[in-house]
Amino acid sequence: MATPIWQDYTLSLGTADYYDYRILLDSPTGEIIYNGRARKRPGAVSVTIKLNGICSNYMSNYTSIDKAVLERTFVVQSLAGGSWTTVNTVTFSNDWSYDSDLLVSDIYSFPVSHIVDRRQLILYATMKSSVTVNWSASDGTTGSTDVEVENCIAYIDPSTLAEDVAEITVDGRLHYTVTDSCRRYVLYYVNERGGWDTLLMEGRHKESDELTRQVISVEYDNRYNEDPGRRNSLNDITHKVTLHTGWLDDASSMLMRHLLNSHNVQLFDMEKNEWHPLILTSTTTEYKTFENLNRQAVFYTIEAEFSNTRIRK
Amino acid sequence: MTRNRITLYIGGRSVDMDSQSFVLFNYTQDDLTNPAIVRNSYSQQLTIPATPANNDLFDHFGQLDRITAEAGFGLLRKTPFSIFSETGELLESGYVRMDGVTREKGRNKSYKVTLFGDLGSLFYGYAFGVDGTPLSLGCLTIVDPELTDYPPDTEIPLDLSEFWGAHGFTGEFSGIINFAPTYAGYPEEFDAGKAIISPNLYANVPSSIYKDSTRYVPMGGIGQPYIINFAGEKYDLEVGEFRAYLMRPVINVNRLLRSIEYCSSEITGKSLVIDGSVYSIVGEDVIWMTLPTIKPEYRGASITLEHLLEGTVSPAAFIIGFAKAFGLVFHTDHDTITMMTRDAWYSRSSDVLDLTERVDIGSIELSPVFADAHFFDFSIPGLGYGAEQKKKASGRELGSLLVDTGYIYNDTVEDVLDGTPFKVADEPRLQSRSFIVSAFKTNNAGTGVEEEYLPQTSYEVVTAHMYKYESGRITEEAQDLPLDSMPSNIAQDMYNFLDWNTRPELCGDDMKPQDGSGVLLYYNGFVNTPAVEYDGGDYIIDFPAKKYWLTVYDAVRIALNDGMDCWDMRHSGRSVTALPEFSYVAAGGTAADSLRMDGGEGIYARRWKKYITDLYDQDTYRMTCRVNLRGMQVGQELLGRFWWYGGSLWVLNRINNHSLATDDLTECEFIRIKDTEDYTNGQQ
């Protein structure tokens, strides 16, 4: 069973005063990612090391939507008598939830909303090699298909299941309602457990550009009005977007942290069929409920910038 | 901020950079006010975020129990870097040094590294080996000489007894003879059967030696060293007889330069080309650089040139010192670095660039060049025990001397030269043994009459060798001591010896500056002290030193240069032992044992008046402004080009914080000049 990377994992190397040790990736013949010499703490019986700090660097690389890092294995060896001996093999899950209830969970998808647009790609993160997708159409027909899992992700395109698909159940646990919304944007994001989730932006959206203008003063001849004395030589443009969710119940609201605290968010434009990496700009995540909003309906506003800057010159 | 896509690679792997990690470059031209100049390449400190990929790249440097693996990132290993543009063009390359890591909440937060590019990577590559060990000149493959051998009739064939008699000693040969081995004269022939005896070692060396009715005179003229050929005899060079190994051999500088050039690509990864203009300075004549004495483990065996070069300075230190001494400049083109004279540098391109369309006139600031030139600063870094002691006593660096020029605003050059004599700023007086160190040279008659020349101004002391000294002879093996491990009384003597109260004087007999035709000289070499008492015996301490001095004494110029311009001094074909000697005189006392100053590492000279003229030119502006350098290849190449703006000519002196990743304007510093040809001439 995998250990969440957020939880401290210590290992005892032995009772000598110190040990040379190393950490290998994936197997005893894998790449050596760390060499250390750990000494016994005063008063301690044995030398102990903590693995999370080093191993987390190999769990959280910035991945794209065709790959999810869910689990990874690390081998710890110590040097004794001139040769390396395996002390322990540990498998970490890319779990940053700090939630003890998820320790034995094999669930990697936590979608906030179960409303999806027909044009929207559903991503399901899992350690399985394939998942079963059951669907039903508005005319009553039903079907089932097995979707292959690649790099821990199953890609489910509603439009390929049936022309008029209305309901989808993934892996027997996640149920989606397929709509023909008139919305434009969908967010894809890495959740707390390293899997990808998706959320249709059912509310309104607003876009803007923030400019930094570079203006320089230059020599000019004042006999000619068209000769400028100051020039706008360069504009640095940051494109911003403000998105809104639809109305959420309390349970869905509690899942918004997966998105709002995510470090990897992508925007999909369903009209232009374009992807845009985003940087979320909010520094506060509020856990809204119907009660703590004084009995008002819950929705969220998401402020973000496009990652890629633009210029005009 | 706009970002042009550049990629930094360290150790062949791309580096994650955040929006604050701009890679900014500074390029610096020679400081107009600094007469001892070498152009530096850039070194740029960079902060790199501790992303997972970067942590892996640096092998988790900064983790508290980390140890360096055999392979992978290590502090002493030269880790290359390169920066590519999005079009695949190599913008900069060199080596990376890890300066530190910032940690926060128990995790690495960022890494501080320094990128050494271009010239910096050449120096770094020539200073440290791949495994981080310091290099010496012994790392070089010495190329074949291109010199003409000295005529054979300058060698005097003597057996040992004849030599003993010719040397002025009577009786049977016995005891100990000190002389320089032929390494000092013939670096291509390390033959124990040849020797050089220098008049600098003994006062009674005859002006000529007769053998078989043939009169032999020293190579280079009377008063110069003899080359003795012990015909058919071989002598043991071990302790007890010849002390040849106690003398410092020399190597031809020209040959050394060629060797450094030859080996550069293999050792540093950068190709170094030494322009013909540099070899023209050195010329066809012989310039020698003194090497350390032969190490004990090599004595008695067949001594090779490589043995002699071990323990010397690194090729980097040699290049830097040589360039500084002769005011050379470097032109870099990523993979190739060319060392050339300033004149050759400025002659590369006569095209003048138009600054008008590129400058942001709202950012222009002007300042006069001479505003801060009230004092000439002859600072050199002081190292070692003596320097530390001096620093504690005086509160300033050894050699950090400010010469008060007496400049008054609106004075002309002539006013300055005719005004107050140049004096050193006040220094604390030593409380004990105050030495007045003066220079003298044995006159041509070889009588040893001293002629006082001038005082030296400063020393840099790095390491010292101690030789036991008895009855005027060196009798025992030297100990090679770093200054900070020397016995305190020895160190104290050295401390006292470094007189702070000598003053450079730019004046004639009437204590007024002359017409500015005097000479500003910088000099590197070795000095050894008079005998100092230690452990029941007398020891001579020998240490490398640098000196600055100013003079208008015609006698000095003539004596040093045979009437030629000072920077032609080295063209006379003299050996190192013919260079000036210095003695010290205890206060109120008489001249004691001589201090030898040999070594031709660096003599840089410049006409004093030209120096003053440049410094006090009231029309010389320094202009800083922001410039649009888009479309230009920015680097060392751009420095030294001439520009036109506002009706005047300017030279680009400095480029500050130029970013390859943005389209921001770049801060540049220009120096106004009167005339391009005038600027390049007389700069050497």
Image (tube, coloured by chain):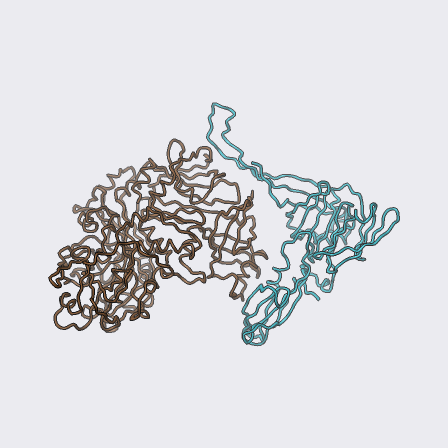
Question: Would residue B372 be found to the left or right of residue B115 on screen?
Answer: left
Residue drawn at (46%, 26%) of the image: A221
Residue B505, percent across and down?
A: 22, 49
Q: Toward which corner of the image does residue A18 lie, by quadrant?
A: bottom right
Q: Nearer the viewer, residue B119 or B494?
A: B119
Q: Is residue B324 left or right of residue B581?
A: right
Q: Colour of chain B?
A: brown
Is residue B30 at least partly visible in the picture?
A: yes
- Which of A263 and B489 lies nearest the eye of the viewer? A263
Residue that sits furthest to the top in the current view: A223
| Image point (50%, 51%), residue name | B82
Give the color of chain A as drawn: cyan
Does the rendering let one see residue B427? no
Residue positioned most to the right: A140
Is A157 placed above or below A84 here?
A: above
Question: Of A103 and B348, which appears nearest the observer?
Answer: B348
Q: Residue B464's x, y, as percent?
A: 30, 64
Q: Where residue A5 appears, x then y in whole percent?
A: 65, 62
